[in-house]
Image (cartoon, rainbow, N blue to C red):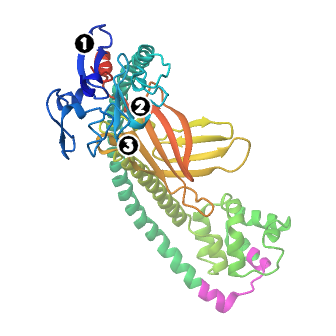
Amino acid sequence: MSCALLLLLTSLALVMGTGTAVEIQRPRGVPQSKRQFYEENKPFTCLDGSSTIPFDQVNDDYCDCRDGSDEPGTAACPNGSFHCTNAGFRPAFIPSSRINDGICDCCDTTDEYNSGATCQNTCREMGRKERESLQIMAEITKEGFLLKQQLIHEAKRGQEDKQGKLTELQGSKKGLEGKMEALRTVKKTAEDPEKEAKERHLKSWEGKYSGITLEAIISLLLTYAHHKFSMYLFSSHKKKGTFGLLGGAGKVDTSTFETVWSGIKDKYLSEVSTYVMKTYVIQSFPYPIVLCCLCSSAAQKARDDFDEAERALREVDGQMKNLEKEIGFDFGPSAEFAYLYSQCYELSTSEYIYRLCPFNRVSQKPKFGGSETNLGLWGQWAGPEENLYSVMKYDHGQGCWQGPNRSTTVKLTCGKETVVTSTSEPSRCEYLMEFTTPAVCQEPASLDEVLHGHTEL
């Protein structure tokens, strides 16, 4: 009998969950998917096509093929691999160098068929544990996917609300812009006479009336102003109120009076109407110092109204920009990740508190005092092409000492809860964060399909 026949393995693969045994003839170490290339009593062609040899040279402990495919069940070829059938569990490949090395690498012990090693077949127990784990994962995936559908529904409704709010703000903006233009005209109309009068009287003052005394101002106001206002000012002067506000100086000039006027005008304007002051003072006493005291309240009101409208417009602009940014953000194919926006999630370790704010930043703060370190700002979705939304990338974080700026990769996995599960630093200044969320859950397959994907006959 040939060596090939001596080493021919009668493999029994158990279909998980059925208890049905199927007998399969193939050389030791050959997976079922490649069985057709190893036909007994026919010449064997190396899988790389490099040469063809008699079939009895397969598994004869001598390497004839450059790719090692003629020795799937021996350690003769350094680049070969051995297939563990592992009936009842998952099949696996190990390097040929581990065949008959005294260590059981295959749970079905088939790699140690001639080493004398005492091994126990643990495939069924490992398969049982894996099925339990897959069952739990299937339930999590199912619940997570249902939650994802809710997230998609809420995101759609939220998007509609935001779009409606944006349309409303666009209307408000147009109204405010029209109001501002009208108030700009009113302000100019109110300020022009004030400006002209001030310039005219300033010229007159600088030429004729600089150095006027406080007593002279009071005297003129007593003569020309409304009695109630004049007496109040005079009373305040006697109490050294006005005199004190003017810094105790006996003389004032335009710049000095304008500086302190803001502190005393409300007191006096509350005692007499602007109309009375205009009538009795401005027309009769053309000194700019008095004009500064009696600045047109209409012009000031026009300025206040314009400033208020301008502030309101800026606020609306800011709200619109925030809404436009959020509406245009890539929150996934069905906006399922939108609920993460403006949220933050923390993980506490023995030394640090890690904080992930999706679509914003990642940070690290010492648990027992110290400043926060920026581990990266939102960059982009960075998963593989077929699963783009499985990885987040945050970069341009705080620089490391004599090193690059910090960055963080966030890997998303399916889960019923939204939580940071782990952090690590695989490379200097490059962090890895594991994050579970229902938003990444895919529609679950049946348990039988999941189990079948882990089984080979």
Q: Which residue is mark 1?
A: 22
- For the point 24% across and 26% down, the residue is 2
| Nearer-the-camera pick, 358 or 138 | 138
Amino acid, disc 1: Val
Amino acid, disc 3: Pro
Q: Mark 1, mark 3: which one is toward the viewer?
A: 3
The magenta span reads: 202-218
The mark nearer the N terminus, 3 or 2, is 3
**Could you tell me residue 37's position as x and y percent?**
18, 32
**Could you tell me residue 339's position as x and y percent?**
42, 35
Amino acid, disc 2: Ile
3D distance between C-alphas at marks 1 and 2 = 25 Å
For the C terminus, give its image quadrant. Answer: top left
| Nearer-the-camera pick, 452 or 356 | 452
| Nearer-the-camera pick, 8 or 358 | 8
Q: Which residue is mark 2?
A: 99
Q: Position of 393 compared to 430: left or right?
A: left
For the N terminus, give its image quadrant. Answer: top left
Say the numbered circle drawn on residue 218: none
- The chief SS type of the magenta part is helix
Give the crowd class for mark 2: few <14, some 14-19, many >=20 residues within 10 Å. many
Q: Which residue is mark 3?
A: 78
3D distance between C-alphas at marks 3 and 2 = 11 Å
**Could you tell me residue 23's position as x and y percent?**
24, 14
Q: Is residue 215 magenta?
A: yes
Q: Position of 431 compared to 19: left or right?
A: right
Quick one: SS at disc 3? loop
Asked if 232 appears above or below 358 in the picture, the reply is below
Do the CB atoms of the residues marked 3 and 2 lie less than 8 Å apart?
no
Quick one: SS at disc 2? loop
The mark nearer the N terminus, 1 or 3, is 1
* Residue most extreme to the bottom: 207
